[in-house]
Amino acid sequence: IPIVHSSDQDSNDLQKSIHLIDSISTHKQQISSIAIVGSDGGGRLDHFLAILNVMVEYGSRYQIYMIGGESVSMVLQTGTHEIHIQECFDNTVISCGFMPIFGECESVSTQGLKWDLFKAHLKLGKLISTSNQVVSDCVTIHTSDPILWTNQITLL
């Protein structure tokens, strides 16, 4: 693996990594997803927020998965999404939530959650959806605006 040095001080390491992916991606080998493993930001809120910022900045080009601890998070762009949840062997409750951290989300509707949403208006300082539970192996989400989805994962 080559080491690439960069003097760019306006980009964080994750942005530099995505710039490298952009430079090596070709029409024959198009990259559409990026997984960031161990992505709790080292316990620093500013690093965690920087990761979220990158997820928004590059979310229209890549589906970026932030995997850390016991959860996976991703930005859901405007539209309808199906999230397939692998069945837990021990019937563990899988917690999940939505955070409108990119501004208001005028409307979110879901199917497959214990407390499904129907055209819910989400906004920080008002309503957010946390501590919900997955009750189906497929969760369908329709959102009018980008939101952050997070769900618990069970590591085997």
Image: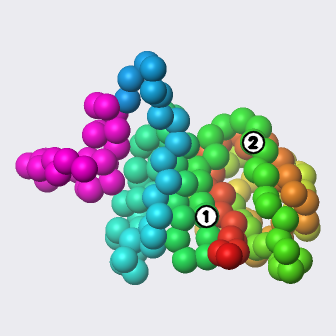
Q: Position of residue 123 (x, y in %)?
A: 65, 58
Q: Secondary structure at mark 1?
A: strand
Hey, which quadrant is residue 29 in on the image? top left
- Highlighted magenta segment, given as a residue range: 1-24
- Give the distance between the C-alpha atoms of the residues marked 2 and 1, in whole angstroms: 16 Å
Q: Is residue 21 magenta?
A: yes
Q: Residue drawn 68% across and 71% down?
A: 153
Relative to the observer, which residue lies in front, 3 or 107?
3
Helix, strand or loop status at disc 2: strand
70 with respect to 51 (left or right)? right
Return the residue at label 1: 72
| Residue tagged 2 | 81
Count of labels shown?
2
Tell whether 3 sits left or right of 32: left
The image quadrant of residue 126 is bottom right
- Identify the mark nearer the N-term, 2 or 1: 1
Which residue type carries mark 1? Val
Q: Is residue 103 visible?
A: no
